[in-house]
């Protein structure tokens, strides 16, 4: 029968016969990506029903350097990327980037270090726009002086192919 993908797709109790055995027949993103709508079929009675899973309901915690944990906040991440990408990247590109980062983090699931969030953003920005990359890196890595900045530029030049103009 169908192979259930890991992560989001848990079995759900059938509202009709209360058996805990269903298959997902259709999954789609709803509510601008904040929810997943699943059409399910009960394997016991054959009836179909729909579930909505709020992405926020699926716990993802970010562990900060201080040791504090907070729920992953997409809006906050997007605001940080937007700030770095001002006049550099269009909103659609930022959306794609943020969605990609979130997807990567949710694949890890549970708890992720804040460093990992930053690195996931930087990896993507590096391939998109060096100015946005450096802006994000300077906030994220807490650059304190010009030497920090120059070191990062050096790293960037070492690790990226020269772009064709
Ligand atoms: Zn049923």
Image (cartoon, rainbow, N blue to C red):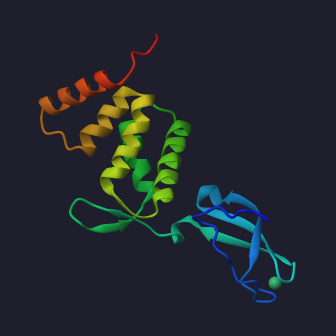
The reply, left or right, for residue 29 in relation to residue 80 is right
Give percent across and percent down for residue 82. 42, 42
Snapshot quadrant of residue 21: bottom right
The reply, left or right, for residue 107 in relation to residue 145 is right
Give percent across and percent down for residue 28. 71, 58
Residue positioned most to the front:
1
When the figure is inspected, residue 153 is found, relative to residue 71, above or below; the finding is: above
When the figure is inspected, residue 99 is found, relative to residue 68, above or below; the finding is: above
Residue positioned most to the top:
165
Identified at 40% across, 38% down, the residue is: 123
- Report whether residue 36 is seen: yes
Locate the N terminus by quadrant.
Answer: bottom right
Identified at 58% across, 61% down, the residue is: 34
Identified at 30% across, 26% down, the residue is: 156
Residue positioned most to the bottom:
17
Give percent across and percent down for residue 51. 71, 73
Snapshot quadrant of residue 122: top left
Camera-nearest residue between 159 and 83:
159
Residue positioned most to the right:
46
Give percent across and percent down for residue 152. 23, 30
When the figure is inspected, residue 148 is found, relative to residue 99, above or below; the finding is: above
The reply, left or right, for residue 131 in relation to residue 19 is left
When the figure is inspected, residue 85 is found, relative to residue 107, above or below; the finding is: above
Ligand 1: give its quadrant.
Answer: bottom right
């Amino acid at each position: 029968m169908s192979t259930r993908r890991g992560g989001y797709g848990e079995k759900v109790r059938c509202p009709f016969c209360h058996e805990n055995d269903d298959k997902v027949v259709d999954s789609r993103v709803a509510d601008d990506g904040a929810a997943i709508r699943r059409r399910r079929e009960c394997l016991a009675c054959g009836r179909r029903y729909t579930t909505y899973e709020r992405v926020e309901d699926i716990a993802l915690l970010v562990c900060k350097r201080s040791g504090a944990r907070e729920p992953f906040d997409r809006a906050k991440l997007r605001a940080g990327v937007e700030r770095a990408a001002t006049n550099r990247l269009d909103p659609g590109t930022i959306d794609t980037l943020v969605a990609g980062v979130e997807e990567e983090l949710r694949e890890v699931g549970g708890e992720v270090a804040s460093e990992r969030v930053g690195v996931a953003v930087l990896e993507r920005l590096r391939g998109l726009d060096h100015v946005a990359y450096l802006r994000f890196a300077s906030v994220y890595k807490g650059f304190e002086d010009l030497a920090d900045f120059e070191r990062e530029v050096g790293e960037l030049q070492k690790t990226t192919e020269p772009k064709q103009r």
